[in-house]
Image: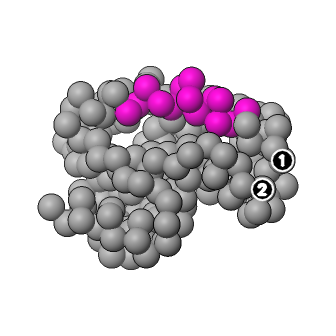
Amino acid sequence: MHVIILGAPGSGKGTQSAEIVKQFTLEHLSTGDMLRAEISAGSELGLAAKSVMDAGDLVSDDIILGMVENKITANQSGILFDGFPRTLPQAKALDKLLKDADQSIHCVIQLDVDNEEIVERMLARGRADDNEETIRNRLSVYEEQTAPLIAYYRDQNKLSTVLGTGSITDIFARIEKILAK
């Protein structure tokens, strides 16, 4: 089973992903975590990605798709895609990568959270790249580039929208009902 979790930065994708992978035994693929690891390692990819991420922009599709393809090839069970795809071209490329591997996306969970709550959450978590201007830019980039994925997956009858507010347990219970089907 392959699952995508969609939502604006700070909507709780990482928190809910941890619960989903435990409950449903999926490999957690977070491109954000993969990129932060590259940055921490000081790799060439990490240094290139850091300047883009610090500005609140998205890393190039070629870099991201290469990392994702390696994970799909190595995976034997299922993957939870957290923060990927972010754009329509990435979604179409992911569909092609999976089709070539005789696989597909089974379900897309969209976490729905108000932008002002997201700003508060992200400022509270205290990451170096989380200042209000960068957060608002990231939300704007999300609206422009990632929001079209909602229609894309809705048209494929794979999208389920989940209210991403309340306790972590309550949000996960909503997600669990969808994935248990």
Q: From the viewer's perspective, is residue 76 above or below residue 131? A: below
The answer to which of 145 and 42 lies nearer the viewer is: 145
Decide whether residue 141 is among the magenta residues. yes
Q: From the viewer's perspective, is residue 65 above or below residue 46? A: above
Coloured how? Answer: one colour
Label placed on residue 123: 2
Q: What residue type is labelled 1?
A: Asn
The answer to which of 64 and 110 lies nearer the viewer is: 110
Dot 2 or dot 1, earlier in sequence: 2
Residue that appears at 81% across and 44% down: 132
Residue that appears at 32% across and 64% down: 174
168 left or right, relative to 124 = left
Residue labelled with disc 1? 131
| Residue 19 in which image quadrant | bottom left
Prevailing secondary structure class for the magenta stretch in the rendered image: helix
Residue that appears at 82% across and 38% down: 133
Q: Is any atom of residue 147 visible in this view? A: yes
User: Horizontal and vertical percent for residue 69?
Assistant: 43, 42
Q: What element carries label 1?
A: loop
Start and end of the magenta stretch?
137-150
Residue that appears at 50% across and 31% down: 146
Where is the N terminus found, in terms of image quarters? bottom left
| Residue 34 in which image quadrant | bottom right
Q: How far apart are marks 2 and 1 (CA)?
A: 6 Å
Q: What element carries label 2?
A: helix
Q: Do the numbered discs 2 and 1 sit on residues whose CB atoms are within 8 Å?
A: yes
User: Horizontal and vertical percent for residue 23?
Assistant: 33, 75
